[in-house]
Image: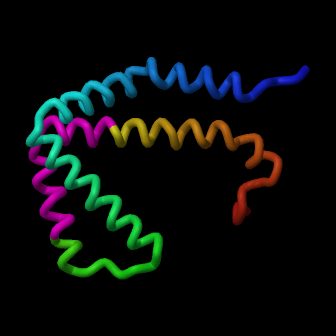
Amino acid sequence: MSVNLYDYAYNLEKALRQSDEYTKLKQLYDEVNADPAAQQLFEKFRNLQIELQQKQMMGQEISQQEVEEAQKTVAIVQQHPTISQLMQAEQLMNTLFMDLNKIITKPLEELYGIPNAQ
C-alpha cells in the first residue's frame, strides 16, 4: 500500500486553517492590523525581534542598549490588550506546531532512538 504523504500534509494544512487556535490567531491579527497605532507598535516589536534573532544567529553580540530597547518595547506591547492576546495566541500555535512535530518525527525517533537517552 502506497501512501501519499503530501495528501496528508495538505489535509493537515486544511485542518490547521479550520482549527480554533488558527481562527482566533487570525481574528486577533486582523484586529491589530485594523488599528493603525496597534499595527505600528506590533510591527516595531516584530522587526526588533527579527533583528535581534538574526544577530544571535550570526553570532553577533547584542548591546545593552538593544536589550533595554527590546525590554521597553515588550513592556509596551504587553500593555496593549489586543497585541497581548495576539502574542498569547501565537504561543498557543507554536505549542501546537511543536506537538505536531513530535508526532510527525516519532517514527524517526523510534527508528534511530533518542540521542543521549540512557
Query: Which residue is rendered at x = 32% and y = 30% of the image?
Result: 25
* Quadrant housing residue 116: bottom right
Relative image position of residue 65 (x, y in whole percent): 18, 78
Provide the residue span drawn in magenta. 69-89
Outermost residue, right side:
1
Query: Which residue is rendered at x = 72% and y = 56% of the image?
Result: 114
Q: Is residue 56 magenta?
A: no
Residue toward you, 111 or 51: 51
23 with respect to 117 (left or right) = left
Q: Is residue 86 magenta?
A: yes
Relative image position of residue 62 (x, y in whole percent): 31, 78
Is 76 above or below relative to 59? above
Is 112 above or below relative to 59? above
Relative image position of residue 110 (x, y in whole percent): 78, 46
Residue toward you, 99 or 60: 60
56 with respect to 105 (left or right) = left
What colour-coding does the image apply?
Answer: rainbow
Q: How many labels does the image show?
A: 0
Q: From the image, which quarter does the C terminus lie in?
A: bottom right
* Quadrant housing residue 52: bottom left
* Quadrant housing residue 60: bottom left
Query: Which residue is rendered at x = 44% and y = 21% of the image?
Result: 19
Relative image position of residue 93 (x, y in whole percent): 41, 36
Majority secondary structure in the magenta region:
helix
Q: From the image, which quarter does the N terminus lie in?
A: top right
103 with respect to 71 (left or right) = right
Query: Which residue is rendered at x = 43% and y = 42% of the image?
Result: 94
